[in-house]
Image (cartoon, helix red, strand yellow):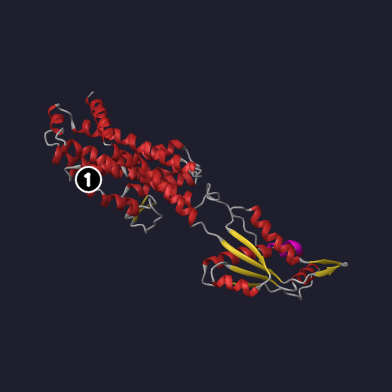
Amino acid sequence: MKIVSIIHKSLKEQLRSFWVLLLTLSMGPFFIFVYYLIMQSSEPQYSLIIINKDKGAYVQGQQINHGQYLTAIFKEAKKDSSKLPFIVNISDDKSDCIEKLKNKKADAVIIIPELFSETIIARSGNDSSLVSQFEFIGDLTNTSYIVSAVWAGEIINQYANHVTKSKRIVDVKETALGTSAKINNFDLMVPGLLIIAIIMLMFTSGIAFVSEVENKTIMRLKLSKVSTFEFIGGVGIVQLIVGVISVLLTLLTAILLGFNYAGSLMILILISVLSSMSIISFSLIIAAFTKSANEILVVGNFPMFLFMFFTGAAFPLKSEALFTIADYPITLQGLMTPTHAISALNKTLIMNMSISSIIPEIIAILTLTIIYFLIGGIAFKKRHLKLM
């Protein structure tokens, strides 16, 4: 079959284009590594300083200091939940703590009042006449202070309710979707970065198509009576293999850096194959309007940046729906297949949803792929394959 010969020839040509192939295969793992370093360096850390002014109280001749117990609870809460980004320090110098707040060396200062123990004991005896007023000090416009204050306030309330045997009026049960309780910001970026690995096919595919024109070998293909379908199919299959390998290398890099995916590997490969087909089809459009590899590298930058930065691949992006089809929102970014591929990967890798949940995304990818292929195939044939 002639298509087998085209695949063999295209594979050899791809291996000869070593640096372009290396760029495509390494870009996904490179972005994974860079985003991992960015997330590690920007991981939030909230510094909390506790000043215990509680004088304690005597119960049956024994001194009890609930301020010290509460301070220990703060430390234990941090120790038991190592993923909480809080640093708890103890101090007795209020002025020094305020200086640290001003110099951004701390986010919040919590002062335990002098009568805290007496208040707790009184509350335990159903005496509500005493009230302890905690002082929270910090920059009220600073998000770090707000997060620290909310966390500290919750621990204080929990401790007071537990010691005084009081019941909460409202209790909140939190249920996480999929593996969202275990993921961090880096994990959230991985689906988009996997698609970046596929977007890079725009260059290798475009060059693979147009190199036949640039090297004048397209004439030999015309004389050998190779059909347009055989030519595009043979080159496309090789590029499809490159795309899947690139995604798997990117996923392996993410796993080595701590990423844990919840969904099926086969669903990931399915989405990768469909997305690769779409990018290969789109590269036909670019190849149709260029005549050399250099032109591909120049012209291809514009759609590559569109696909990377306006689909949610490089960073999360959300826009209002222009309209809906069967309750599936269609946005301006939805005209680019990476948008739907990222949505599908988020559902399967992060939320651990089944393949039935991503049928709308699959339909959208296939529809756009057909449109890309028809436009690119017709334009490429008219421009470069008139006799085929």
> Which residue is found at the position 69% from the left and 62% from the top?
158
Can you give x and y, in whole percent of width and height, for residue 162 in the image?
73, 61
* Residue 74 among magenta residues: no
Nearer to me, 261 or 41? 41
Above or below residue 216? Residue 99 is below
Q: Which quadrant does the C terminus fall into?
A: top left
Above or below residue 150? Residue 353 is above
> Which residue is found at the position 64% from the left and 63% from the top?
89
Mark 1 secondary-structure assignment = helix
Please identify the quarter of the rendering in which residue 156 is found: bottom right
Can you give x and y, in whole percent of width and height, for residue 274 in the image?
35, 39
Can you give x and y, in whole percent of width and height, for residue 345 in the image?
43, 45
Can you give x and y, in whole percent of width and height, for residue 130 in the image?
75, 75
In this rendering, would 58 be left or right of 250?
Answer: right
Nearer to me, 46 or 337? 46
**Visible residue check, residue 71:** yes
Q: Which residues are magenta?
A: 158-163
Residue lying at the far right in this picture: please name it.
61
> Which residue is found at the position 51% from the left and 51% from the top?
184
Q: Which quadrant does the N terminus fall into?
A: top left
Residue pointed to by mark 1: 296
